[in-house]
């Protein structure tokens, strides 16, 4: 699963996920997705200090989706 996770830890993670109900697994998925989104934005902001939130979002869209958003549309 993860290159930085021991096989024992990976087994425990999988067991925990198996025990969760479908709703809880979906919630975990959304939470992890939100964490990844925020981490990506933070990384972009750190690499481009002084840029406003709109520019950071434009860079995110370009990075993740490969689409360049015009300045006036952001």
Image (tube, rainbow, N blue to C red):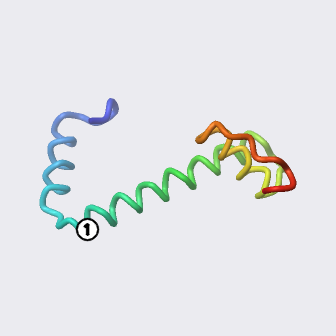
Q: Can you say whether 19 is above or below 71 in the image?
A: below
For the N terminus, the quadrant is top left
Q: Answer left or right for 40 relative to 14.
A: right
Residue 14: image location, x then y, percent: 17, 48
In the picture, the quarter occupied by the C terminus is bottom right
Looking at the image, which is closer to me, 31 or 50? 31
Q: Residue at x 66, y 46 (%)?
A: 60
Residue located 64% across and 50% down the image: 42
Residue 40, image x, y percentages: 59, 47
Residue 47 x, y percent position in the rendering: 73, 39
- Lateral position of residue 63 relative to residue 30, left or right: right
- Between residue 38 and residue 30, name the one nearer to us: 30
Residue reaching furthest top?
A: 3
Q: Crowdedness of circle 1 by 10 Å Cα count: few (<14), some, many (20+)?
A: few
Would you place residue 2 above or below residue 12 in this image?
above
> Exactly how many numbered labels are in the figure?
1
Instruction: Find disc 1 in the rendering and name its residue.
Output: 24
Quadrant hosting residue 24: bottom left
Q: Secondary structure at mark 1?
A: helix
Residue at (16, 39) in percent of width and height: 8
């Amino acid at each position: 699963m993860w290159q930085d996770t021991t096989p024992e830890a990976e087994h425990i993670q999988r067991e925990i996920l198996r025990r969760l109900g479908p709703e809880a697994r979906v919630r975990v998925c959304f939470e992890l997705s939100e964490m990844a989104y925020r981490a990506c934005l933070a990384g972009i902001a750190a690499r481009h200090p002084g840029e406003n939130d709109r520019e950071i979002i434009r860079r995110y869209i370009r990075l993740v989706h490969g689409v360049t958003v015009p300045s006036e549309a952001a």
